[in-house]
Amino acid sequence: MPGYGPKTLSKASDFKFLLIVSFLLIPGIAQTDDGPVNLDEVLERSERFAVQTRGCALIDGYRCLNSKEQDFLTAAAQSTMLPGGFLKAWLAALTDFSNQKDQTPAQLDLKHYKFGFTESPEHYVILFQGLLLPVIETQDGEEVVAGLLRTTYGRTTKYWITKSDFKVHSKLFYK
């Protein structure tokens, strides 16, 4: 049918569609004891919470990681050690990522991401994974994270950096 399908959706409607789907996938979010939830208000509240400054390393839901200073020295560490080649590749990926013109400076702020590092025989692979936005509820007059939306503030991007010259070989954007 003409006029229907993904090719006719604008970026804003794509985003709202994904947000609606996220509400359908997470039980109990689209309806509360007080009645239906306004999706625009939920998203606005989540984004407002996400851009606040916190003095910690953030994980999905914009919660603090709460790691210990020497955590990378323990067997069950959430932190890790990286070989130097990954950091050289990181610089190439970061430079390219920072120069994206189709995202706002706020969306490019690294606090909205967590990072993955792996490699293939020819490439270092670096993932800029957008943090999932939180579902915010007010409890005792304080905003708290009550769950996760299946959407991010920034855009997840994967880079392949050539090992021989540390240049961006290719990149892939995720929605």
Image: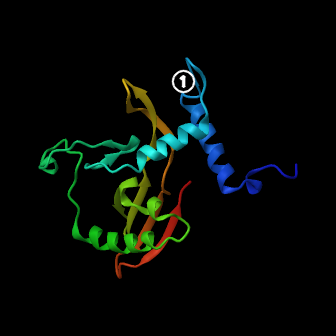
Residue lying farthest to the bottom in this orientation: 165
Q: Quadrant of residue 96?
A: bottom left
Is 60 situated left or right of 174 in this image? left
Give above or below for 27 relative to 149. Answer: above
The residue shown at (50%, 39%) is 149
Residue lying farthest to the front in this orientation: 141
Residue 114 seen in the figure: no
Q: Position of residue 110 (x, y in %)?
A: 37, 60
Q: Position of residue 29 (x, y in %)?
A: 54, 28
The residue shown at (75%, 57%) is 7
Residue lying farthest to the top in this orientation: 33
Q: Position of residue 38 (x, y in %)?
A: 61, 33
User: Relative to the observer, which residue lies in front, 48 or 21?
Assistant: 48
Give above or below for 50 relative to 7. Answer: above
Q: Looking at the figure, which quarter contains the C terminus?
A: bottom right
Is 18 situated left or right of 50 in this image? right
The residue shown at (39%, 64%) is 125
The residue shown at (42%, 47%) is 50
Residue 86 seen in the figure: yes
Three-letter amino acid code of the residue under disc 1: Gly
Q: Position of residue 11 (x, y in %)?
A: 66, 56
User: Relative to the observer, which residue lies in front, 30 or 27?
Assistant: 30
Provide the secondary structure element on which disc 1 rests. Answer: loop
Q: Which residue is mark 1?
A: 28
Give above or below for 75 relative to 160. Answer: above
Q: Quadrant of residue 89?
A: bottom left
Q: Quadrant of residue 145?
A: top left
Is 78 situated left or right of 50 in this image? left
